[in-house]
Amino acid sequence: MKKSANNRREKRPTVNTNDIYSVPSNGTIYSPFSFKIDPMEQLILVNFEKDPDEFYNIFEFQQACDKIGKNYFLVIAYRNDGASDVYYQAGFPFGSQESVLNSASFFVRPLEKAKFEVDSDSLDASFVFEDKIGREIKVRVNERNRQNKEPFFLLAPIGAISKKPVSLPVYSLYEFSFAKQKYTDIEIVIGKVKHKPDTFPMPIERSRNYFTRYSADTFNVDWNSNFNGPLSPLTPDNNSKIEDNAITYEIEENGGHCEIKRMSTKNKKHMIAIDFHPAIPDIVSLRQEADINGTFSISTDHTAGSLHGNYKIRRVDNDIDFEIHPTGGWEPNESRLVLKIVFFVVKIFKEWPKSYVWNAKIRLDESGEPVMQSGWKRL
């Protein structure tokens, strides 16, 4: 009988035994992890792959907010050859756009007429710019009667297109929905040539929809960006927590050793957390040939799903090999039948994380201090 992913996770050990260590702890711990929050706040994707331009077939329109609260706009023009051209306002607070796109070229444009307004009643998104060969591109999406929509949560499959990832992009799309054909006007004009927007093949919310989809509330986090350098020691407080670089670590004690059972970060609206079972050990105190296998789970606040996987840690001489693999992919926990069908039919929504693997080699120098070289790859 085939066992489910949930059953496989249940058989993993939930705590480390103390015999994985050979030397006592000095009270500190080293974290090989990082978070980086992307400043994007809203996005909309307009597909016209069935009626493409000679160069472009999808536009992605983003709005981001800088540290002082000023909004900026950006348009990703996906090309028919798999590359992309990025048109952005000067000063746009970039996140990981360059790293998740393939063969991206960047162009500054004023985008002074850009608009991205969405509320409970309507969506009004539009932009106009001149592309790299001098053509005017104009896109407008206006949806009315949003009062009865039932937006949902989606883990963005942006990681599926990246050939050389530099992080695991955990991009949470809150208030996500498709544009209803009955109430939506879409205009796509490239060099005075009009193009028809793609439609979605099945009804959602008892309505026919365009494949144009948008999120009014994005929370994009990059986990474990590629790294090469020394790790810094961290000391827990009296509540068994560590605050470092806007990351909160929750610590579990094991025979005097500090172990990371959870890490989290947040912005003004949302939070992401990663739980480890068993907790990540005190890596510098591991005994020779120590071999730890565990699981992890990534979740964000108020979401209908989580991302699961396995980790492996092994010490040989002064080297510690660490691997993370999201083998479980994203598991939606969506009660609406139609969305269960969508996620089943469009498998990329759930499957793309499984192709990501993070490998780190942590070397202990003569003083016992760790230096790490790490990176992601696609299988």
Image (cartoon, grey):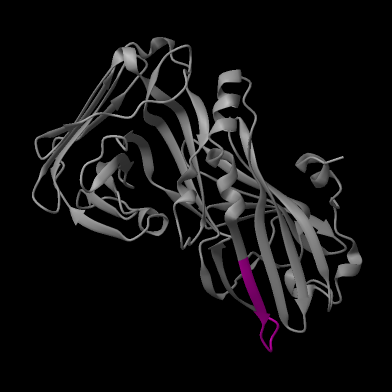
Q: Position of residue 144 (x, y in %)?
A: 30, 14
Q: Position of residue 166 (x, y in %)?
A: 48, 62
| Residue 149 in view of the camera | yes
286 in relation to 310, above or below: below
Q: Quadrant of residue 233?
A: bottom right
Q: Position of residue 96 (x, y in %)?
A: 40, 55
Q: Quadrant of residue 40?
A: top left
Q: Quadrant of residue 211?
A: top left
| Residue 369 in view of the camera | no
Quadrant occupied by the N terminus:
top right
* Total tally of numbered discs in the picture: 0
80 in relation to 376, above or below: above
Decide whether residue 363 is among the magenta residues: yes
Decide whether residue 106 is among the magenta residues: no
Q: Please name whichever residue, 152 or 188, is drawn nearer the observer in this view of the structure.
A: 188
Q: Please name whichever residue, 222 or 240, is drawn nearer the observer in this view of the structure.
A: 222
Horizontal arrangement in the rendering, residue 79 relative to residue 298 (left or right): left
* Residue at the bottom extreme of this rendering: 366
Residue at image location 48% in from the left, 60% down from the top: 165
321 in relation to 266, above or below: below
Q: Please name whichever residue, 94 or 201, is drawn nearer the observer in this view of the structure.
A: 201
Question: Which region of the structure is painted magenta?
Answer: 359-369
Q: Position of residue 350 (x, y in %)?
A: 59, 40
Horizontal arrangement in the rendering, residue 20 relative to residue 145 (left or right): right
Residue at image location 40% in from the left, 31% down from the top: 215
Quadrant occupied by the C terminus:
bottom right
